[in-house]
Image: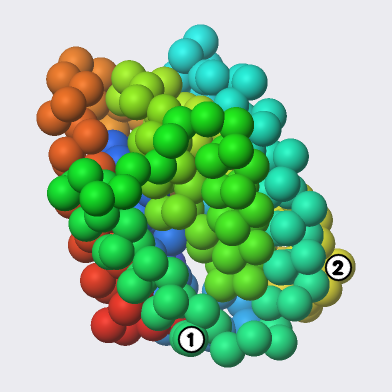
Amino acid sequence: MGIYVLLILAAFAAALLSGAAGFGGSLLLLPVVTACLGAEAAVPVLTLAQLMGNLARMASGWREIQWKSVGWFCLTALPLAALGAFGFTVLPKDLVTRCIGGALILLALLQRFKIFRLKGNRRTLLAGGAVTGALSGLAGSGGPIGAAVFLSLNLAPVAYIASEAATATAMHLLKTVLYAKLTHVTPQAFGTGVLMGLAMVAGTFLAKRLIRNMERGRFQKFAMVLLCLAGGYLLLFGA
């Protein structure tokens, strides 16, 4: 019973973070789920929980979703997520995860000091979607990369959160179907994912209240700091 309480509390905290920043939930949850349920079940269970959490993030800002940007992003993200899901047992997840962390820190610093900035255009959405989809399938999470791409669009906080969540929902839905066919997830693990997902729904709607009136520039700085922290965590600890 204690393990399930821990997983539910961790899911709520993860949703509170990702609901406020647009990413970060999987970074908190993956090591916790792996320790509690084992590596084999971690990615499928986490995918199911994140699917429910991202549906809630979509619903919380439905009217502000930038559907055109979501469409361009998903055009490359979905096929690459499917390919990554088939190959996620082949490549060493630890190496992939550390590479993501290093890239995030470099990207955040380059943008912060105006050495390089992602341009919020169609090309960035297509390239970012491809990278995010591949990493999401391979390592269980490409969310911080997708967050960096949507930050480049300079959207209002709720529009940014909901739009990025729409792309994540599409990828997690696809991966849930594929993981169900590729892995052997027990009914107990499936139920755990659903309970964690419900906790993420609650955390998501609380986070919306926190960011609704946050000034756009301040929000951008807040999200950029979290990108650096997420990158540092991945670089140091890996998968």
Residue pointed to by mark 1: 95
Which residue sits at x=60%, y=38%?
Answer: 123
Q: Earlier in the sequence, mark 2 or mark 1?
A: 1
Is 20 located above or below residue 81 in the figure?
above
Q: Which mark is residue 85?
A: none
Out of 114 and 176, give the one closest to the viewer. 114
Is 204 located above or below residue 43 in the figure?
above
Furthest residue in direction right, as rendered:
181
Which residue sits at x=54%, y=83%?
Answer: 93
> x and y percent of residue 98 in the render?
40, 79
With 199 as the anchor, is 9 left or right in this view?
left
Marks 2 and 1 sit apart, C-alpha to C-alpha, by 26 Å
Out of 177 and 214, give the one closest to the viewer. 214
Residue pointed to by mark 2: 181
> x and y percent of residue 60 in the render?
44, 22
* Residue 137 can be seen in this image: yes
Task: Using the rendered view, name the quadrant where residue 191 is placed.
Answer: bottom right
With 14 as the anchor, is 34 left or right in this view?
right
- Label 1 sits on what residue type? Leu
User: Regarding mark 1 in the picture, which secondary structure is present there?
Assistant: helix
Few, some or many residues within 10 Å of mark 1 (<14, 14–19, 20+): some
With 71 as the anchor, is 82 left or right in this view?
right
> x and y percent of residue 148 in the render?
39, 46
- Mark in the foreground, 2 or 1: 1
Is 215 located above or below residue 5 in the figure?
above
Which residue sits at x=74%, y=39%?
Answer: 75
Q: How many marks?
A: 2
Out of 135 and 36, give the one closest to the viewer. 135
Is 77 located above or below residue 5 in the figure?
above
Task: Using the rendered view, name the quadrant where residue 109 is placed.
Answer: bottom left
> Quadrant location of the C terminus?
bottom left
Which residue sits at x=45%, y=42%?
Answer: 149
